[in-house]
Image (cartoon, rainbow, N blue to C red):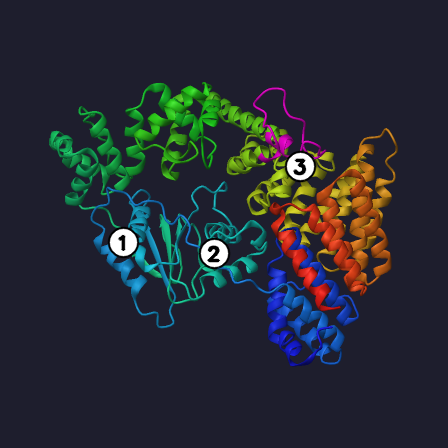
Amino acid sequence: MTGGGADVLEVVALSALTAFFTAAGNGAAGEMGKQLLLTTGALARRTMGREAPLPTGPEGWQSLAGQVHARLGRDPERADEWALLVRSFPEQARPLVPTGGLPPATRDFTNRQRVLKQLKREATRPAAGRPRVALLHGPPGIGTTAVALRLGAELYTRFPDGQFYVDLRDASGGHGPEPATVLLRLLRQMDVAPERLPPTAAGREQLYRQLTAGRRALVVVDHASSVAQVRSLVPATPDVFLLVVVSGRPFALEAERVTVPALTDRYAVRMMRKVAGRQEVARAKARMPRLLEHCAGNAFALKTEAMGLLAEAAEAEQRAGGPGHHPVRAAARHACDRLGAETARLVRLTALGGWPSVDAHLAAAAAGVTPQEAARMLDEAADVQLLDLVADDRYRFRPEVRQYLADTAGPEHGVPECSAAVERVLDALLNRALHAAHAALPQSWRTEPAPSDGDAYRDEARGVAALAAEVGNLVRAVSVAEEYQHVTTALRLARALWPLQLKAGYWDEVLPALRVAARCADEHQPRSRTAAGIHFQLGHCLGELGRWEEAGHAAHAAVGSERAAGHVRGEASSVELLGLLNLYQWRYEAAYERFVEAERVYGRIAAGQEGAQDVARALALAERHQGRALRGMGRLADSQRLLESATDFFKERGENYNRARALTDLAETLHDAGERAEALTKIAEAEELLTPAAAPHLRYLAGLRLRCEGGR
C-alpha cells in the first residue's frame, strides 16, 4: 500500500481526479488509450459499487470525479488504488514542436504593404484579453495565400515556437473537412504522435490548447469555408496568432477582417516584370492596357499572362472581357491555348471528378494515354500555371481553374468521352485500392483478392502507404461513383478502405466515404453481405471516434444484414463489434452477453463451411473479450481463467502481438485481484514479446508495473 496520508489525498484531490478522468476520456486513442479507459472504468465501478457508464462530455467526467472523490475519504484502500493509477499515468507535458513551418513565400510578391501592415498590427498589438485572430479574404486568385506566406516569412522570429499551416482546399468533399478533422490535421502538423491523437473533437481541442498555452506561434488555416471549421482554433493564449484565409466571400468569424484588393495597374505591371522580365513586358506595351483590364488586378491572372509572355512573345491579341468576366477563368483559358491539343485534353479530362490530387497514373487513366506521356503533359500544364506541384510527383488544381477545365471539357470533347474518362479513373483507382488493401491485409476476408491486372504491392507496409497516399481520391471516388450510378464500384471502393481504418487510424478521413457507401448500399443492395460489410466498417469507424449512438445503429444494421444474407462469420463478427462498443462505454454486462452470443454464432460454423479456418482464432479472441468484460464486472476468477486460455492459444499459434495484449489484460486482472507478484510476471512476459515499435504498449506496461510495485 502507499501508506495513505496527505500525499495520497493530494493525488486524489477532486481537481486531480477531474483532470485525470478528462485526460483518460479525451485521450483514448489507439489500443493503449482504450486499455487505460477500461482500467479507469473498472476501478470506477469497484469504487461506486455499481455500473458507471462512460461519461459523454466534460460535465459528465466532472460529475463522476465528484462521486468517486466523495467515497475515497471513507475508503483509504480505494484511495490508494486511485493514487497509484493517477501516478502511474501522469499527464505528460507535450512540447509544441516547431515542424516544417509554412510553405515558402513567392518571389513575385508585389504591393501588399497595406494588407501586411494590418495583419502585423493584429499580430503584435497588446493582447488586452482579446484573442489575436485575423480573417484574410479576397476573390479567388487575388493572392490571399501569398499574403499569408509573406507574413509568416517577415514575422518568422516573432513565433519561435512554430508556424503551422493547414490547407483545406484538398478536401475530398464539396464543403471541406469537418471541424474535428481540421483539428486533427493541425495536431499532426504540430508533430503529435498518432497514438496520442484524441479521437473526439473535444479531446483534440483540449490538446491543441495544452500545446499552445503560453507559446508564441502562428497558425494559418488556408482555404477555410465555414466559421465552424476554425471556431475551436481561436487562441486562448495571448501570443498565438490565428490567421484564417478565405478565397471568396468572408464568413462571420470574430476577427480582424483584412481584404486583399486588386492590384493597381502600376503594381500589376511591376508583378509582370518580376515574372516575365522587363523586355518581354516592354514588347507587349501596345497590348498592356487591355491585358491589365482583362486581368483586373488578379495576381493569379497576371502571373499566368506573364508566363504566357515569357513563353510566347507573339501572344494572341484578342482578349475577352465584358460583363461577368472572371480573370481566373480567362487566365486558365489562355493557358490552355498555349498547350498542345493533347495536353489540353488531358488536363480537361483529369479535372473531371474533382480529384483532390492527381498523378501521372490518374491522368493517364483520364486521357487514355501511358503514364509516361501523362507525366510529360502534367509538367507542361504546371509550367503554364494550370496545376501546382505539391509533393511526391502529385499535382493539384486551384479550385477555380479545375472548375473552368471541367466546365469546358464537355463542349470541347463531348459528354460520352468525358463520362468514359471518369469511368477510367474510377476503374484505375479501384484497381490500385484493391491491390493495396489485399497487400495490407492479405489474410482478411473483409478485403477482396488482388486483381489479376495492375501493379501489386510487396508487403503490408507498402499496401497501407499506398492507400494512405491515395485516400483523398478514394474517398472522393466513392461519391463520384455513386453520382455516375456505378454502385458496385462505389461499394467496392469503400470496402477497400478497411485497412486504413483498422491499421492506420484514418477514421476521420474515411468516414465521409463510409456514410455515402452505407446510404448507397441500403438503397441498391439492402440486407446483403456487401451492405453488412459497409455498415460494419461504419460502426467501427464511429466507435473509434467516440460517436457511440451512431456506431451502435451501424453495428446493429450490420448484424441484421449479415443474418439476412446467411453469412454466419459476418454475423458473429458484427455481434462482437456490438460487444466492443458496449465494453468501451463501460457497459460490461451488455458487452459480456454480446461476446458470449458471438461465441455461440461462431460455433454454428461447421468444418468445411465458409470461415471454418478462422473459427479457432475467433473463439480465442472472444474469450479474451469476455475476460476483459468479466474484469469490469468484478468477476476476477472467471476473467483470469478465460484470459489464461486465450494467452495459451496465441502462444501455441506464435501470435506474439495478440499474446502480449492478452497478457496485459491478464496482468490487469491479477492486479485487481491483489496478486501483484504474478501480475509482474505477466508484465515481464508481455514486454519480452514486444518490439521497440510498440512504444505505446511498452509505456502502458511500465505504468502497470508501477501500480503493481506500489501496491505490494
Question: Is residue 462 toward the left or the right of residue 84 in the image?
Answer: left
Q: Which residues are magenta?
A: 436-461
Residue 152, horizontal then vertical, whole percent: 32, 53
The amino acid marked with disc number 2 is: Ala
Name the residue rendered at 26%, 39% in the picture: 323
- Which quarter of the picture shows residue 527? top right
Name the residue rendered at 34%, 28% in the picture: 381
The amino acid marked with disc number 3 is: Ala
Q: Is residue 643 above or below residue 472?
A: below
Q: CA distance from mark 3 to mark 1?
A: 52 Å
Asked if disc 1 and disc 2 are in contact, CB closer than 8 Å, the reply is no
Q: Is residue 452 magenta?
A: yes
Which of these two is toward me, 219 or 407? 219
Mark earlier in primary sequence (3, 1)? 1
Question: Is residue 243 toward the left or the right of residue 110 in the image?
Answer: right
Q: Is residue 530 magenta?
A: no
The circle on residue 228 is 2
Q: CA distance from mark 1 to mark 2?
A: 29 Å
